[in-house]
Image (cartoon, helix red, strand yellow):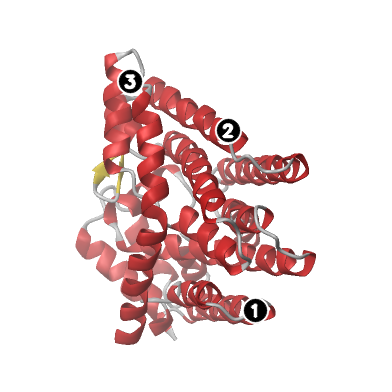
Amino acid sequence: MHQEENLARKLVAVLEEKSSEALKIAKAIMLAEPPKSKKAKNAMDYYIKNWYNIIHPGLIRLAGESVDADPNLITQAQVAMLMLTAAFDVQDDIIDRSLVKSGKQTVFGKYGIDTAILIGNAFLIKGFVALRDLGVATEKMNKVFDLIGKAFYELGNAHALEIELRKCKKVPITSYWRVIKMKAACFRADVELGAIISKASTEEMEILKCYGQIVGELIVLRDDFIDVFEAEELRNRIKNEILPMPVLYALEDKNECKKIEKILSKPNITESDVDFLVDCIFKSKNVAKLVEKMQNLVKQSVKKLEGLRKSQSRELMQHLALAMLEGISKIE
């Protein structure tokens, strides 16, 4: 367990280092042309002050470095993706009615829906401008726009399907798996983007694309596990979203089902309720099967990367996949 924690801490430090320059540039671009409205400006300042994203830019740089991409091109690609994912982040909070996330008010929760939509639009526009300014050859630029367009369209479809599934009294696990696979598209796009702007071969491109899809699924699944541990997030998932995947799996377990349903039916879930729910999930044999699926995904991603030449970036990408099991694999 300590080894997993040490690995995760080291990875966070590495990803922060590999993302810091791009995040600094992205913040400067957004602050250089502030909204004219005082409320919108305050909302933009608020988002930028709390803006922390190391996964998307980190994946782009690791993938790009693994196939010898130009460092400056990588940074520009990171800046573009930081803005585009920020746009979807803000809009996600509106769709999910998330007023608070990670202990802080969202832009939607603090400034309301109208301002949040405008802030999301600003990030989206600036993101595509940054993408246009990549400065790669026309053929590669066409591939980049095609990649980003398809990835975010797939992500949008994932959210549309998720909204539809909210109407179900009991969400089928197979349907939610489909949502997770579709949500992985933006992480797959990070890795593919790093490959496209490099001199990657067709084989290397395919390896990185496959890795990106798998690690994307692992990231989404890990976030679902984290939501179980946070009372505020769990309350919002129960009220406005689909239940986290580990809860759906545990509800299929006859030994834990009634206890979990009792907790979920409470009007106000407390920290002690969360502790009890986590205990039920960790005892569930069905959830152990979910963890086993995640372990298999990790093995697949690590093995897939063996097809790339040995490098520090390849090793870090493998470690990133392994870190997705931190604090989860003890369910075995």
The tag on residue 128 is 2
Residue labelled with disc 3: 40
Residue 256 in view, yes or no: yes
* 82 sits left or right of 207 in the view: left
For the N terminus, the image quarter is bottom left
Task: Indicate whether 3 appears above or below 14.
Answer: below
Task: Indicate whether 290 appears above or below 171.
Answer: below
> Residue at the location (46% across, 67% down)?
246
* 130 sits left or right of 104 in the view: right
Give the secondary structure at mark 3: helix
> Residue at the location (65% across, 52% down)?
197
Along the line of sight, which residue is nearer the eye, 67 or 280?
Answer: 67
Residue labelled with disc 1: 309
Give the secondary structure at mark 2: helix
| Amino acid type for the residue under numbered disc 1 | Arg
Q: Are marks 3 and 2 in contact (CB under 8 Å)?
A: no
